[in-house]
Amino acid sequence: MVAMGRKGTDDTDRLCAAEAVQFLTPDLLEFLADLYGAPASIAQGAVQLLPFGSRAALLATGLVTALDDGDGPAHEEILQLTDLAFEVIAMAASAAASEQIDELAAHAAAIVAARQRG
């Protein structure tokens, strides 16, 4: 068995779900909404298959962390969904159920703006 080490797990700059949603495209939000209710292993496998730009957005927002198996080049990292990812997945699924994916980003922006004022 190979030991796995986490990369980029500094929680000091952790976004909340409403903040993270602002950085995701409507297509990526729809993809995440489709993962709602799926076992974590299935969701993580699906995320691995996303294009580079989508995976990079998930990494940058803290929705996934990269696990390095210590064997081979750095591009052989495994992405693991974080608790924040499951919050965003639930948020996206709720919006998708009422067909409001596009409005979700606007609502998230309003929440963040209100937090910054208060």
Image: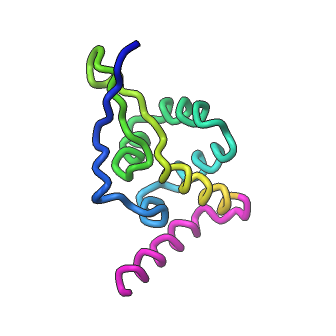
Number of labelled discs?
0
- Tell me the residue at 43%/59% (across/down): 20
Q: Which colour scheme is used?
A: rainbow
Quarter where residue 99 is shown: bottom right
In the rendered image, the quadrant that contains the C terminus is: bottom left
- Tell me the residue at 42%/46% (across/down): 58
Is residue 99 one of those drawn in magenta? Answer: yes
Is residue 110 one of those drawn in magenta? Answer: yes
Quarter where residue 77 is shown: top left
Up the image or down, 1 lies above or below 83; here it is above
- Tell me the residue at 42%/74% (across/down): 112
Using the image as rendered, state which of residue 2 and residue 64 is in the foreground: 2
Q: Main structural element of the magenta stretch: helix, strand or loop? A: helix
Q: Position of residue 73 (x, y in %)?
A: 26, 18
Q: Position of residue 71 (x, y in %)?
A: 30, 15
Question: Which span is picked out in magenta?
Answer: 97-118
Using the image as rendered, state which of residue 36 and residue 109 is in the foreground: 36
Q: Where is residue 60 in the image (x, y as percent from the top left)?
A: 34, 49
Using the image as rendered, state which of residue 83 and residue 105 is in the foreground: 83
- Tell me the residue at 49%/50% (across/down): 83
In the rendered image, the quadrant that contains the N terminus is: top left
Using the image as rendered, state which of residue 118 and residue 23 is in the foreground: 118
Furthest toward the right, the residue is 97
Up the image or down, 30 lies above or below 73; here it is below
Q: Where is residue 38 in the image (x, y as percent from the top left)?
A: 67, 39
